[in-house]
Amino acid sequence: MSRPPARPDDEAAFLAAYDPREFPAIALTVDIVVLTMRQGRLNVLLVERAAPPFQGCWALPGGFVKAGQEDLDEAAARELAEETGLSAGALRRVHLEQLGSYGAPRRDPRMPVVSVAYLAFAPDLPDPRAGGDAARAAWTPVVGLHGGGTGDRQLAFDHAQIIADGLERARAKLEYTPLATAFLAPEFTVPELRAVYEEIWGEKLHPGNFHRKVLSVPGFVESTGETAERGGSRGGPRARLYRAGDARLLHPALLRPDREEGVR
Amino acid sequence: MSRPPARPDDEAAFLAAYDPREFPAIALTVDIVVLTMRQGRLNVLLVERAAPPFQGCWALPGGFVKAGQEDLDEAAARELAEETGLSAGALRRVHLEQLGSYGAPRRDPRMPVVSVAYLAFAPDLPDPRAGGDAARAAWTPVVGLHGGGTGDRQLAFDHAQIIADGLERARAKLEYTPLATAFLAPEFTVPELRAVYEEIWGEKLHPGNFHRKVLSVPGFVESTGETAERGGSRGGPRARLYRAGDARLLHPALLRPDREEGVR
DNA sequence: CTAGTTGTTCTCAGATCGAGTATTTCTCAG
DNA sequence: CTGAGAAATACTCGATCTGAGAACAACTAG
């Protein structure tokens, strides 16, 4: 067991005797995988590091947790607002959830740093502003990013892994939650919703069956009675408009087309 | 942004200039929700705290992370082995996964402590040994534990919430993974497997349909060709024995009976 | 105006699911 | 030893869901 050495019986005495150097120094950060749709493509927010380590590399937005002053969720929301420039009101339309914690021993060369990663789904957001110790901030298409393709930006720390985990979580979440709507405007059409699924899952879906399924799951979407202003960019009738429903989970779920029998 | 103040360009210089007091002191623990089946009931491992805070309360087993010396997963496995007395070999049959991180500002009255919670599924384990700063350690039935029923042991910190989250994760995991087998011996019968589902989901399942489903999902179980030594304790023929198959995910999933239409 | 695209609805066959039944084999009470 | 009850497994049947495709109308681009 590795408890801190000093532990008097009451808190005041403990704080008086407290010396931070007795503890193994460890720092805690939050890093956020912010996903959004831009021109129909899935993008992730990256910042260019202005200082070592990994100076010049791209990294996830994030920062150190203000120990004792904020919950982890609050820290993530604060960093998200700082890096995207979103108002508190606009932030309410963003889905934010904890993804997982990463603490490999030397993932940060400076010192032991454990990162609590968050995952955010946002509708099309304005261009980010660089700030703090970020030289630049930019939306980056995720295609070819994970897996280490040719056009990859070099990612700092273990952020490539965190993004890969976030994408897998996002793919799974679309199956059994209505969170695909978080990528869209408050009113959207079924074909727009289908485009979100197709982009994140990387597969074409059957338009007729998708339409039937979305409308049949209780609480997924509710009709506004209106229709879109224009038809599709390449023809077709105007689609009907819907709002997100009140369901938190999809029952029954929208399952991905077979990704190989069994997934052993 | 809340970066540490000093940040020279090379690591050696940084370490020389490093002063832990410049950082907000924060400690990191791992806490583990270890679930196992004992006499057909789901149990969680709890330890009685021998020292303040929450002296005399029951808490999840866990301890401080050795900063920079171990991965979070390794820290969880180490704590699990210490508290259960399991050998490295026996540990290999235990499923261990990260559950989430908890960092409310004053969840520990001593100082800012963030806990990375893990979730473990184990077959019937020997009685735990008290050790370190635990006065006692005991398997505790989870019935009536969450929710704050009458017979509750008072739980330290936010551990009641962590256990509740772990149980909900466990219920979901049984749907789309074969991890229910992690609660059983290497060879088991379909009715034993069904008992695990019924205990964790808290519902009786249709024996015939469950049987058909388990055998039809590819890679869930594979037959040993043997049958159990005895029939059921209250009669019935001897059941056939199976081993866990090689599937990591169940396709198609084993869905829970409707927990209210929609789950809004 | 024409050709091509797309939103929406329908149809239909196959798979799946919930519920119930049948058969056989076992344990337990007496 | 025997009979009652319980349980493992297999089977049936109707309702539901799914995937694939076709039909039709409404729209855009040229």
Image (cartoon, coloured by chain):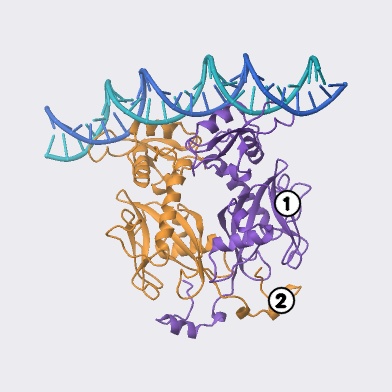
Chain colours: A orange, B purple, C blue, D cyan
Left or right of A247 in this view: A134: left
Q: Chain of mark 2?
A: A
Q: Position of residue A147 (x, y in %)?
A: 35, 56
Q: Is residue B83 above or below residue A253?
A: below
Q: Position of residue A14 (x, y in %)?
A: 71, 76
| Corner quadrant of residue B31 | bottom right
Looking at the picture, tell me which residue is in the foreground, C15 or B81.
B81
Q: Position of residue B168 (x, y in %)?
A: 60, 46
Mark 2 surroundings within 10 Å by alpha-carbon count, few (fewer than 14), some (14 through 19), many (20 or more) = some
Residue drawn at the location 74% of the way across and 78% of the way down: A13
In the rendered structure, which amino acid carries the disc numbered 2? Phe
Q: Chain of mark 1?
A: B
Left or right of B242 in this view: B51: right
At mark 1, the secondary structure is: strand
Residue drawn at the location 31% of the way across and 55% of the way down: A144
Between marks 1 and 2, how big is the CA–CA gap? 32 Å
Return the residue at label 2.
A14
Return the residue at label 1.
B139
Q: Is residue A138 above or below residue D22?
A: below
